[in-house]
Amino acid sequence: MATDITDTAHAVEAAAVMRLLPARPRVLALGEPTHGEDTLLDLRNELFRQLVEQEGYRTIAIESDCMMGLVVDDYVTSGTGTLDEVMAHGFSHGWGVSAANRELVSWMRAYNDGRPAPERLRFAGIDGPLEITGAASPRQSLIELHCYLAARVDADLFPCTEETLDRLLGADDRWADPAAMTDPAQSVGQSAEAGQLRLLADDLVALLDAQTPHLITATSREGWDRARLYGRTATGLLRYHHWMADTSPARMTRLVGVRDQMMAHNLLALAARGPALVHAHNSHLQREKSTMRMGGTPLEWWSAGALVSARLGEGYAFVATALGTIRHQGVDTPPPDTVEGLLYTFPEDRCVVDARRLATALGDPRPAARVSPWFGYSPLDPAHLADSDGIVFVRDVPQS
């Protein structure tokens, strides 16, 4: 069977990816099936460089805290801070220690040096200020939004003062308490203060929206865009904390769904600004529903990619990444009756595969689903091959 489908594979280059698509998408998403492997990030860097230089993409976004990402964006666009500071304070999830991420930021800064503002690359995080152990306080985003408005809008129009927000927020460690992730009773997300904050955050976002013509003129579209990010983050975090305090069986489904909604809203905002490249886990970028088991409970929710694709149509493209081996993580040669096993027989160590042609060539019954021996790795779902625009296959991932 493999000899019948090898002609679907091409070298991993921007041109090969673009040939899979009817036109240049507004958002081009490259997924990965696991985190923390610099081999995959090096491949991302090279592909994104080509897409910037050949296809005119001007934003690079990754699965990292959207508020922390502003530190990186300030550095790559204007040289604010030092590279060491940016890597220490501009990434969540520990991504700042990655040599490949450091190389990406360095390249973006060098690319922008001497270029006029409209031609500069921009950086963005698409994730909320969230970790697997919990969620951040909404203080930073709420106060930043309030300060932006307070400097430019009549005080009589405000729903509250900054002092009121500070009093309702209380100590930040109450919000970030990791115990709340496993025990809803430890969360402050459904307290009376949190309920008031949700209403006030909504009112502040509404005020920002109502004053849009004045605010863009008084500051800039860039300043207004950043204030909108503050608003999205504040309302998303407060919603996330609300469901952290939930005791129903749907609690975890709601939490993972809210996280992907936050990602989707950030991606749509980037798309409105211009063509964007994004890199995140396959499960966040795929067009179909995402699934996982947590504590023995199956979860199912619409991914950020599914939400964005529903809005942008052909303006959204998704290229998944599939792997052969990650031997240092216990992922050995894939079984021959799986998608990864079939791709493993291809002569190329790395290739771009036309996913829809591959799905058609394989026909029915589809290959078996590969079972992951490692929680951190998610194989492709053979039932959804045709939902991807393409697949980047990497035969072997050596230890970094």
Image (cartoon, grey):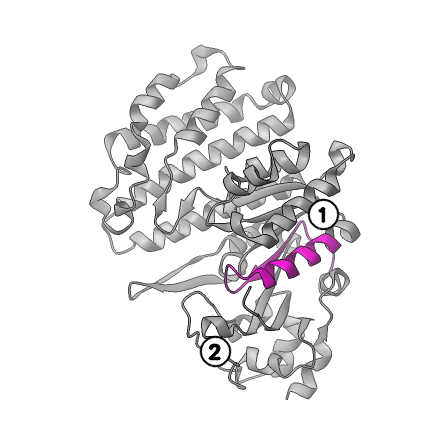
Which badge, 1 or 2, is on the more N-terminal residue?
1
Give the crowd class for mark 2: few <14, some 14-19, many >=20 residues within 10 Å.
some
Relative to 145, is 100 above or below?
below
Image coordinates of residue 36 in percent, x first then y, are: 51, 59
Residue farthest to the left, as pictured? 185
Relative to 54, is 213 above or below?
above
User: With 27 as the anchor, is 367 left or right in this view?
Assistant: left
Image coordinates of residue 376 in percent, x first then y, are: 44, 65
Query: What segment carries the magenta color?
Result: 22-50
Badge number at residue 57: 1
- Quadrant in the rendering for residue 199: top left
Badge number at residue 23: none
Q: Amino acid at mark 2?
A: Ala
Q: Amino acid at mark 1?
A: Tyr
Q: Which residue corresponds to the image point at 43% horizontal and 48% vertical from the top-left?
A: 259
- Quadrant in the rendering for residue 59: top right
Secondary structure at numbered mark 2:
loop
